[in-house]
Image (cartoon, rainbow, N blue to C red):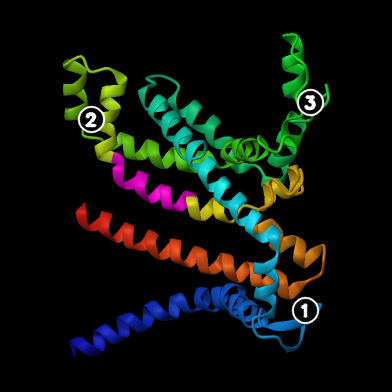
Amino acid sequence: MRKERKMKKNLGGWILFLPFLICITYTLWMPTVQGIIWSFFDMQGYTPTGFAGLKNYRIILKDTGFLRTLLNTLLYVFWSLIIGYWVPFVLAVMLNEVLRGKSFFRFAMYLPSMAPGIAISMLWYYMYYPNGSGLLNMLLGWFGIEPQVWLQNANMTIPLILISSTWKSMGGTLLLYLAALQGVNRELYEAALMDGAGIWKRIRYVMLPEVSGILLLNLVRQIISVFQIMEEPLVMTGGGPNNASMSLGLLAYRNAFQYFKIGNALAVNVIMFLLLVVLTLFYFKLEKKINAEN
């Protein structure tokens, strides 16, 4: 009897879940599996014309530009951990210390996350504009400093793109950090204040131990997210100068929609997909460990 009730209860849950399952299978998993299969074929447009084995992968891996693109993607990850990972946490700590106007500042910091990504990229593109009409160069001009080339400087391109990306996406991360900080044991926090602990000691000995779990999870989420970066370099630099800002996502886009080499684009996507699967599995394992500890 209990078994039948349990089966009926599970059946009801599956019936409710079925529309979502069909939708995600049709829009996500079927294209993913189809893309993996087609990456082993010669492609004429979006039509497979014959089995090619590992030909598309050999073409991509032998291309000297692929190695540089992979290194660029790792550079995106590196700079995102410096800019995009810690900046939201620092701002969350500052916002947590604010006594008045917290709701206003919280909304103001989340506001860029509500804007379309392309619009944000275009906004920052014109801020970085290399001649005197760019906003940053106008500000420099007021202090008598010569205009900078900004995005045309290969050494600065990736960090500058990550600044715009962080400004766009940090709102959600900041709110997660802020929620974690507001869950810090108030007795410990007040005891630290009474002992005369400064802000740095409160962060190190009170806040960080309490929010270490969310910091670790966001670390992996940050890497997974930035590994897929494509929109910002496409809009702001087109992958330049001299492919200095080319990412794996942008390389796949170029192969598909600029060079019309669909097989090569699919091979790049599969390589990126496998790397992301490894990172995602690590994320789930880490999340399970943190939840068990808590």
Identified at 50% across, 55% down, the residue is 224
Instruction: State the separation of the CA atoms marked 3 and 1.
Output: 41 Å
Q: Which label is found at residue 134?
A: 3
Instruction: State the separation of the CA atoms marked 2 and 3.
Output: 43 Å
Extent of the magenta region: 211-222
Q: Is residue 139 left or right of residue 35?
A: right
Identified at 65% across, 39% down, the residue is 161
**Residue 168, image x, y percentages:** 60, 40
Circles 1, 2 touching at the beta carbon (< 8 Å): no
Q: Mark 2 points at which residue?
A: 205
**Residue 197, image x, y percentages:** 23, 18
Of residue 19 and residue 146, the one placed in the foreground of this image is 146
Q: Mark 1 points at which residue?
A: 46
Instruction: State the separation of the CA atoms marked 1 and 2.
Output: 57 Å
- The crowding category of the residue bearing disc 1, from other C-alpha atoms within 10 Å (few below 14, some 14 to 19, many at least 20), is few
Image quadrant assignment for residue 52: bottom right
Label 2 or label 3, whichever comes before in sequence order = 3
